[in-house]
Amino acid sequence: MQALHGLKVIEMGQLIAGPFAGKTLADFGADVIKIEPEGTGDPLRKWRMLRDGTSVWWEVQSRNKRSVCLDLRTPEGQDAVRALAAEADVLIENFRPGTLEGWGLGWEQLHLLNPKLIMLRISGYGQTGPYRDRPGFGVLGEAMGGLRHLTGEPGRVPVRVGVSIGDTLSALHGVIGILTALHHRHAHGGEGQFIDVALYESVFNVMESLVPEYDAFGAVRERAGSALPGIAPTNAYLCSDARYVLVAGNGDSIYRRLMRAIDRVDLADDPALAHNDGRVARCDEIDAAIEQWTRQRTRDEVLAVLTDAGVPVGHIYSVEDIAQDPQYLARNMIVDSPTSDGRPLKVPGIVPKLSATPGRITHGAPTLGQHTVELTGQGWPARTL
């Protein structure tokens, strides 16, 4: 039996943030009912690359879920949601604040209907504050949260990370909120509650020392390319075959092993460089010494030498590297998933890995409205955690 077996979840979100939270719960056994608009379904069905008319991203994001098509603007669709919510443990939504209230499906109404219900509400700016009514996407949350300002090369345009990290960070914060609220309900005899997750706040929550450094020193952290300011040495270094290695030699003992491995005993034994603060003051000198050594060797030669020396070192993976890497394969991080067209598709495996109740893919993503007849107006069997 999986850890979340018996947990009943309604997913009313679209695209990334809400559905990623639903996917995470479904991977560990929750029964996730995805509500989609009739005719078109979740727009993610048509995002990025399509195979036979359906996005392969959709196959990952909606695995282990069931699909119900409803028109939430009609009384019939709203009544169907109420019937499902009356038996649900969790409801996930990522509409603009006030949308569900306009349909008579807001927190106050659903809480009266089912006091044990937990509602995850993900939005651009949260359910309160002067920006609450603005539309917000992950890219705006990344910018407002401070991440975009730090991403890229000094003096160049701030760049995107490359994936919708603001949405997925919000989804993961939402899952933390759901599991915390479930524990409170179960262990303390509490009722359900709603969880207010803002995209920008989820990004801001992982920005480390950004604010205290500004408060204490007036420091405004800027883009630093592949380096990590204030921690040394950690950077990308060019090799003789025009490929890069990533070296994280910032631990005190690791730094000494690194310097000895590159034949710079003078830097290894310099007492001024024994700790991070001293190394930061001479970071350019240290980086130059490392790259002088890497430029004389191929990437694979550098990886072999530094790995043998016990220095954290790696390289920049493309998806081709990922698909062939023995570590990924050994830990089942690339797995075959069934799809609605009957053809297997390689998808990311389950994270995190639980020893006793691991997650798994029980079925592929549903076709549009596949479970509408089965579930509409019936709810689930009355069995709540």
Image: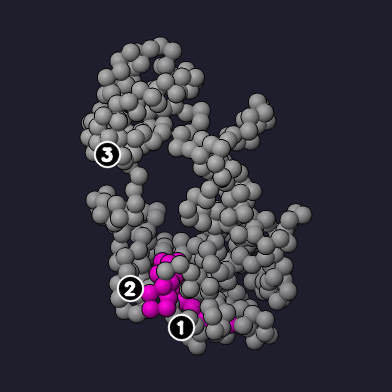
Q: How many marks?
A: 3
The residue at the point 61 percent across, 49 percent down is 143
Local secondary structure at mark 2: loop
The residue that mark 1 highlights is: 370
Cα gap from disc 1 to disc 2, whole angstroms: 16 Å
Residue 314, image x, y percentages = 32, 39
Q: Is residue 66 visible?
A: yes
Q: Is residue 162 left or right of residue 300?
A: right
The residue at the point 34 percent across, 51 percent down is 318
The residue that mark 3 highlights is: 241
What amino acid is at disc 2? Pro
Local secondary structure at mark 3: loop
What amino acid is at disc 3? Asp
Which of the numbered marks, if any, corresponds to residue 338? 2
Mark 1 vs mark 3: which is more N-terminal? Answer: 3
Residue 123, image x, y percentages = 64, 60
The residue at the point 31 percent across, 59 percent down is 334
In the image, residue 326 sits, relative to residue 214, either above or below, namely below
Please provide the residue range marked out in magenta: 50-70
Mark 3 vs mark 2: which is more N-terminal? Answer: 3
Q: Are marks 1 and 2 in contact (CB under 8 Å)?
A: no
Magenta-colored stretch includes residue 65: yes
Task: Say few, some or many: other residues with alpha carbon within 10 Å of mark 1 (under 14 / 14 to 19 / 20 or more).
Answer: some
Q: Is residue 43 left or right of residue 62?
A: right
Cα gap from disc 1 to disc 3, whole angstroms: 52 Å
Local secondary structure at mark 1: loop
Choose mark 3 or mark 2, whichever is in front. Answer: 3
Residue 93, image x, y percentages = 60, 67
Magenta-colored stretch includes residue 133: no
In the image, residue 33 sits, relative to residue 121, either above or below, namely below
Task: Say few, some or many: other residues with alpha carbon within 10 Å of mark 3 (under 14 / 14 to 19 / 20 or more).
Answer: few
